[in-house]
Image (tube, helix red, strand yellow):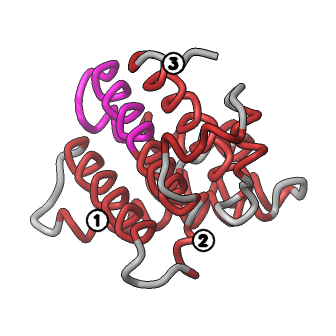
């Protein structure tokens, strides 16, 4: 069987990263297996090591891809909004929605991977990627609003409330408490 061209190899790598980014957000880094992942990407298990050094390397790259996906979503919201405060509100409302709660595989990697990262070594590549993801989200959210002199503190509170509320809402899904958590956090942040 002939080897894949560079373009095909890159396309395969992107397929694996997309599938991995969804799986780590949906099930966590520890529950993702290489054979299941490669099958989800429509590829054979044998090709994995042509694309990634290890499962940890893949998880780190998939996490980075998930964080970048959220930043692209934020940029699209900003482009579609009349101004920064409207973009901020639209992002918070989307983030703290039942739909976002229920689609972890396409949701926020920061909320989804918090438990995995908390258990990772402090010098791990996964933790470094996670911290970069948080910093990027904080920076993008800071661009959305008219802020006071204490801007960073306000944005840190917003990101903390959003991610924490999403974690709690996902953990209590199926109980009316879940939607009440989302509603309360959304109301706190956008003044409803």
| Mark 2 Cα-neighbour bin, 10 Å: few <14, some 14–19, many ≥20 | some
Q: Position of residue 66 (x, y in %)?
A: 48, 44
Residue holding disc 3: 4
Mark-to-mark CA distance, 1 and 3: 49 Å
Residue at left offset 37%, top offset 61%:
129
Q: Which mark is residue 10?
A: none
Residue holding disc 2: 116
Nearer-N-terminus badge (1/3) = 3
Mark-to-mark CA distance, 2 and 1: 26 Å
Say what secondary structure mark 2 lies in. Answer: helix
In this rendering, would 21 be left or right of 138? right
Residue at left offset 68%, top offset 60%:
28
Residue 73 within the magenta-colored segment of the rendering: yes
Residue 189 sits in quarter: bottom left
Residue holding disc 1: 154
| Mark 1 Cα-neighbour bin, 10 Å: few <14, some 14–19, many ≥20 | some
Tell me where the magenta segment starts and ends, as one range: 68-88
Residue 16 appears in the figure: yes
- Tell which residue pokes out farthest to the right in this image: 174
| Viewer-nearest of discs 2 and 1 | 2
Nearer-N-terminus badge (2/3) = 3
Quarter of the image with the N terminus in it: top right
């Amino acid at each position: 069987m002939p080897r894949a061209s560079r373009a095909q190899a890159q396309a395969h790598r992107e397929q694996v990263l997309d599938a991995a980014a969804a799986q780590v957000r949906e099930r966590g880094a520890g529950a993702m297996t290489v054979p299941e992942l490669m099958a989800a990407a429509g590829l054979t298990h044998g090709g994995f090591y042509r694309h990634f050094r290890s499962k940890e390397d893949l998880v780190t790259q998939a996490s980075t891809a998930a964080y970048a996906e959220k930043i692209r979503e934020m940029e699209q919201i900003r482009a579609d909004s009349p101004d920064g405060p409207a973009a901020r509100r639209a992002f918070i409302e989307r983030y703290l929605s039942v739909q976002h709660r229920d689609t972890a595989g396409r949701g926020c990697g920061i909320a989804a991977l918090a438990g995995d990262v908390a258990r990772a070594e402090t010098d791990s590549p996964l933790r470094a990627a996670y911290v970069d993801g948080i910093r990027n989200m904080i920076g993008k959210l800071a661009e959305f609003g008219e802020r006071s002199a204490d801007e960073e503190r306000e944005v840190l509170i917003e990101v903390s409330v959003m991610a924490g509320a999403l974690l709690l809402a996902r953990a209590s899904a199926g109980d009316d408490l879940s939607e009440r958590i989302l509603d309360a956090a959304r109301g706190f942040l956008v003044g409803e």
